[in-house]
Image: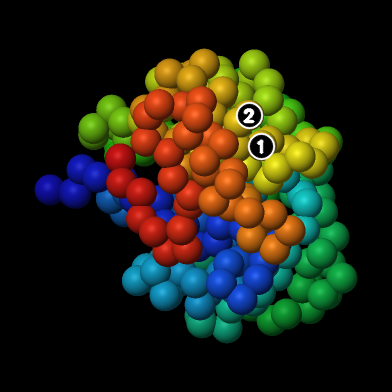
């Protein structure tokens, strides 16, 4: 019998990468499903460091086209190819994000790489509760959030346990974020700070309160230009449930 628990592996947590943090991206596993969510700079090594099989990845979901969320895609695809992957590899995301990825790959002349794996692009429309990936173990839906470029957040439901994990991606406070996070068991919410298009720790906490989330995990924080511990304390003054800073390679089960 397949293990009932779904797992989200934090492969990167930061808004600005430094010696101890990569930019935000993660891997989701449940049963036979293994997906990347966003794609930082060292996907193959990070996936393997997390104890997962890099060549068994089933696909990639990108939330938007800002470089910190997609700059690892060329090396992701190249390493899969070099390691012998030849079957289809789906990439899901907003139309603009998929266009930018295709242009990135065109710049590398990927059409000339012999016997390259078949990449299939699947557009996610900016419509609330859009189905993305679903099987007997897991259901992933996407909803638009409030960022200066087209961006989606993800709601991941473990069909076996009924538990829900939500990842907001980059966003300001918005009623759509609260809708996305409604009754989530784990809410992974960005907390960049006082930057346009982003959220503070207090913003994340208020979204968690309004959504009735059970646990708040702060991500996309700045350890270079800010103080993550201060962001954490700011959130704790508002949200009375469990609050923590996301950690590199930590596993969140639901």
Q: Does residue 76 show up?
A: no
Q: Residues within 10 Å of mark 2 (few under 14, many from 20)?
A: many
Q: Position of residue 191 (x, y in %)?
A: 62, 42
Front residue of this view, candidates 111 and 167:
167
Q: Residues within 10 Å of mark 1 (few under 14, many from 20)?
A: many
Q: Is residue 230 above or below residue 79?
A: above
**Residue drawn where x is 76% and y is 39% of the image:** 194
- The residue wearing badge 2 is 203
* Disc 2/disc 1 C-alpha distance (Å): 5 Å
Q: Position of residue 30 (x, y in %)?
A: 32, 49
**Residue drawn where x is 68% and y is 21% of the image:** 174
Q: Position of residue 202 (x, y in %)?
A: 60, 31
Front residue of this view, candidates 191 and 225:
225
Q: Position of residue 73 (x, y in %)?
A: 67, 65
Residue 122: quarter of image: top right
Marks 2 and 1: CB-CB under 8 Å? yes
Secondary structure, mark 2, is helix
Secondary structure, mark 1, is loop
**Residue drawn where x is 82% and y is 37% of the image:** 196
- The residue wearing badge 1 is 200
**Residue drawn where x is 77% and y is 49% of the image:** 65
Q: Does residue 225 show up?
A: yes
């Amino acid at each position: 019998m397949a293990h009932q628990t779904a797992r989200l592996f934090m492969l990167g947590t930061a808004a600005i990468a430094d010696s101890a943090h990569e930019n935000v991206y993660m891997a989701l596993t449940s049963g036979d499903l293994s997906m990347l969510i966003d794609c930082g700079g060292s996907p193959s090594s990070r996936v393997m460091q997390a104890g997962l099989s890099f060549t068994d990845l089933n696909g990639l979901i990108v939330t938007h086209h800002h470089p910190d969320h997609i700059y690892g895609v060329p090396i992701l695809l190249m390493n899969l190819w070099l390691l012998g992957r030849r079957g289809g590899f789906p990439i899901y995301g907003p139309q603009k994000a998929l266009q930018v990825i295709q242009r990135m790959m065109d710049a590398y002349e990927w059409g000339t790489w012999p016997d390259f794996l078949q990449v299939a692009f699947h557009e996610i429309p900016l419509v609330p509760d859009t189905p993305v990936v679903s099987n007997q173990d897991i259901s992933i839906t996407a909803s638009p959030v409030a960022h200066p470029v087209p961006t989606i957040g993800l709601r991941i439901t473990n069909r076996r346990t009924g538990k829900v994990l939500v990842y907001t991606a980059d966003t300001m406070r918005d009623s759509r974020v609260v809708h996305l996070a409604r009754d989530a068991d784990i809410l992974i919410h960005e907390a960049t700070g006082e930057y346009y298009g982003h959220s503070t720790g207090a913003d994340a906490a208020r979204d968690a309160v309004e959504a009735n989330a059970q646990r708040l995990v702060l991500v996309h924080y700045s350890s270079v230009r800010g103080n993550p511990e201060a962001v954490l304390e700011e959130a704790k003054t508002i949200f009375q449930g469990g609050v923590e800073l996301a950690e590199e390679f930590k596993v969140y089960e639901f």
